[in-house]
Amino acid sequence: MIYIVRAQVAHTPSNPFVGEGTLVAFDDGAVAFSGGRILACGPWSEVSGAFLDASVLDARDSLLLPGFVDCHVHFPQVRIIGAMGLELMDWLRERALPEEARMADSTYAAGVASEFVSGLAASGTTTALVFGSHFPGAQSALFRAALDRGLRVASGLVVSDHGLLPSLHVSAETAWEFSRELIDYWHGRGLLRYAVTPRFSASCTEEMLSMCGDLLADADDLLFTTHLNETLDEISLVRSTFPWASDYLATYERFDLLGERSVFAHDVHPKDDELRRLAVAGAAVAHCPCSNAFLGSGLFPLRRHLDAGVRVAMGTDVGAGTGFGMLKETLMAYQVQMLQRDGVRLGPAELLWLATGAGAGALGLASEVGDLTPGKSADFVLVRPPAGSTLAAVMARAESVEEQLGAVFTLAREESIAEVRVAGEVVWP
């Protein structure tokens, strides 16, 4: 069966940071799909004419966008969103780590996992790189919930053997065994992938980081994710933990954890040479502006990353982040750049790219998701302004899809997410 969604349509098939005019938009547009794959994207008159027998969903009151891609979000931290007044290290010690220790209770973890995947879907996130749990049972609960919901999720057991709560520590040998069991069972099942995930280098001995390098090398389609240069205090802790390291990035680099499959969260305070090495390796950085502001971590130097050639995507960083919505996350990115003397001026095309195609590229999924090009998976979001809302009023007077997109990034939140599909199947509501 062929389906067509008639709507206002916008996507960014190419990177607007390296070219102009990359926002493709249709005021009266359509997307045709079948078997989970996009068949056509273009003006309604052309798409409907090419598929005369298709079943049509009339969504002309909505804006159709590619599914959002969240490249850094913590599954066990859903229930501590909004823990105010703390900087990173105090926030971890007082709020995040005690909550993560509760994930040892598999029943509790299963409830959090259900809330987590529902939160992603309700916000229009169809693909996510998820920071998992320290406990195998909780990690399996996340994978199971994502599989049941139909989301495209990469995640892995968080491993640490130093500097956290004792209940969150395991030996490198045990971490290897747990990780291999999870990989063997979950990696490649449905739309799931595995990501090797040390919490951050200061919470790991060299033996643990070496184990992570061995694990990553064990299969060529695993991802790697962790934290990097989030706060100045964190950087000082890493420096004292690894006195031999020239910088924070070197603590991963030595153990073969820097490469094209690596996604580093934050990188608010990088050295120039770290940026150079990230670019040469083809690694990506997940920018998390709401979390950086909430914890007072700093203002992300986007221009320095772009000038160095580092790939940048977006992450919500729940629970230091303020929610699952990629729309409000990109709005914060816009505002952060406006505050900086050398900030990058971001428009609707750049924001849409950061929320979709940039993340797809960072996760090695550029050929599968991130835009509405025919042949890709039919992952998309319908954004519909609630009746009587400010968003509805602004969109009604907008003279182009680009103007409407700007209004959506500024005003739309969960209540505006009307429908979400992954591979053509409805995952929300």
Image (cartoon, helix red, strand yellow):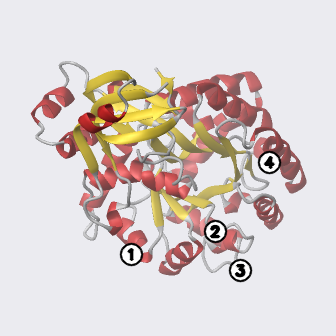
Judging by the rendered image, the residue that carries numbered circle 1 is 307
In the picture, the disc for residue 233 is none
Amino acid at the residue labelled 3: Trp
Q: Secondary structure at mark 4?
A: loop
Q: Which residue is mark 2?
A: 259
Mark earlier in primary sequence (2, 3): 3
x, y percent for residue 215: 80, 58
Q: CA distance from mark 3 to mark 1?
A: 29 Å
Q: Which mark is residue 244?
A: 3
Q: Earlier in the sequence, mark 3 or mark 4?
A: 4
| Residue identifier under label 4 | 169
Foreground mark, 3 or 1, reads: 1
Q: Is residue 232 above or below residue 276?
A: above
The residue located at (68%, 45%) in the rendering is 193
Mark 4 or mark 2, earlier in chain:
4
Q: Is residue 280 left or right of residue 395?
A: right
SS for dot 3 = loop
Which of the two marks, 2 or 3, is nearer to us in this view?
Answer: 2
Q: At label 1, which amino acid type do we have?
A: Asp
- The residue at 67%/78% (across/down) is 245
Q: CA distance from mark 1 to mark 4?
A: 39 Å
